[in-house]
Amino acid sequence: MNNAASILLLIFLALTFIQSAYEKLFYWQENVDWLKEHFAKTRLKNLVPLALVHLVILELISGILSVVGVIELLVSNGRTFGFYGAIFSSITLLMMLFGQRLAKDYDGARTIVIYFIPAVMAVYWLN
């Protein structure tokens, strides 16, 4: 598949997840407070900070692997890091989707699907 399309998708994923992790880290308490309210009626209500730590870690892994994947594609036409960046991005989005469905936030879940489609396209193209 075309390297340009794969590079653009990896840049999209990198920007999405690095920006998201940055916002969660630098506005931690605001995020915890909002998410505690969001998940107040779910089994996650007492696990919000721990779940958020896991999510930030996965977002950083997804974003960093995507950046390295872009560099690898440009330098050596390699696809390994980009492929794993797309895989981790997809897993991260599935976790977010699960949380939104658990919270019965169907609009939020629908939004995550919009991000999931390019992530799966990247998995397919970089495989």
Image: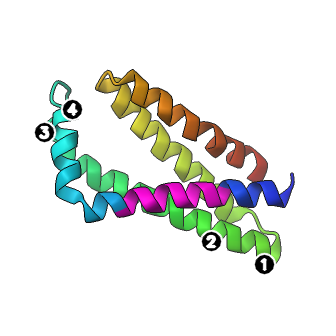
Hey, what amino acid is under mark 4?
Phe
Q: Is residue 49 visible?
A: no
Q: Which of 23 and 67 is in front in this view?
A: 23
Residue appearing at x 20%, y 42% in the figure: 34
Residue corresponding to mark 1: 75
Task: Tell whether 7 sits left or right of 46.
Answer: right
Hey, what amino acid is under mark 2?
Val
Labels 1 and 4 touching (C-beta < 8 A): no
C-alpha gap between disc 3 and disc 4: 9 Å
Give x and y (percent) for residue 7.
73, 61
Figure check: 66 above or below 119 = below
Hey, what amino acid is under mark 3?
Asn
* The magenta segment: 10-22
Residue corresponding to mark 3: 46
Mark nearer the viewer, 3 or 4: 4
Residue 53 location, quadrant: bottom left
Among numbered discs 1 and 3, the one appearing first in the sequence: 3
Hey, what amino acid is under mark 1?
Val
Residue corresponding to mark 4: 39
SS under mark 1: helix
